[in-house]
Image: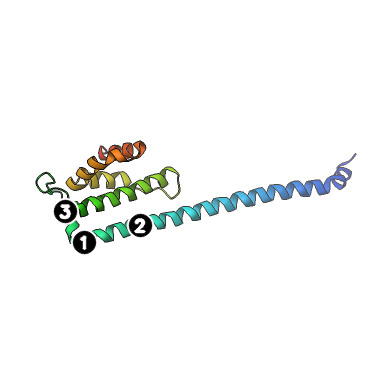
Amino acid sequence: MGISEWFSNNVFNLFGVVGVIFSLCFTASSLRSETKTRRISNLLAVTANHREVWNIFLAHKDLARVRDANAKPLIQPVTDTELIFVNMVIQHLNSVYRAMNDQLFVKLEGVRRDVAEFFSLPIPRDVWEKVKATQNDDFVAFVESCRNWK
């Protein structure tokens, strides 16, 4: 049996195999593109949520102490408004942490530094110490590692 005879007997099988290989390559390419698009979309959603949380800070002058490095929570205790706001930041950070772990958006550079800076402030540090017992262990470990980050 020569090549031309084998080819004529198996041409449909050959086209079938080439078609399957082509469709697998196309599907892989589509999935990669869809994943990239979804990751960018998720990043945009996280950015919008971040903006929304910090717009609350900007809209309420009574939250100014949250970012005050000289605040003294032992002398002037954390207010309910400050506690609620810092909790909102913690919940937002928890969502970002979960999404990062699941690789649901492109990696954010500088997250550790931002977390370290925020929780080095007296009010956020005080609130964190009060609420961290209610958080998941892996999230607490992440925040604590950021706080110790230099």
Mark 1 crowd level (few <14, some 14–19, many ≥20, 10 Å Cα)? few
Judging by the rendered image, the residue that carries numbered circle 2 is: 49
Q: Quadrant of the C terminus?
A: top left
Give whichever of discs 1 and 3 has the lower sequence position. 1
In the picture, which quadrant includes the N terminus? top right
- How far apart are labels 1 and 3 at the CA level? 11 Å
Given residues 25 and 58, the one toward you in this image is 58
Label 1 to label 2, Cα distance in Å? 17 Å
> Comparing marks 1 and 2, which lies closer to the viewer?
1
- Residue drawn at x 73%, y 48% as measured from the top left: 18
**Earlier along the polypeptide chain: callout 1 or callout 2?**
2
Relative to 14, is 112 on the left or the right? left
Tell me the residue that label 1 is attached to. Answer: 60
Residue 129 pos. (x, y %): 23, 40
Label 3's element? helix
**Foreground residue among 24 and 140:** 140
Amino acid type at circle 2 is: Asn
Q: Amino acid at mark 1?
A: His
Task: Name the mark on residue 85.
Answer: none
First of labels 2, 3 by sequence position: 2
Q: Is residue 114 above or below residue 138?
A: below
What amino acid does circle 3 point to?
A: Arg
Residue at mark 3:
65
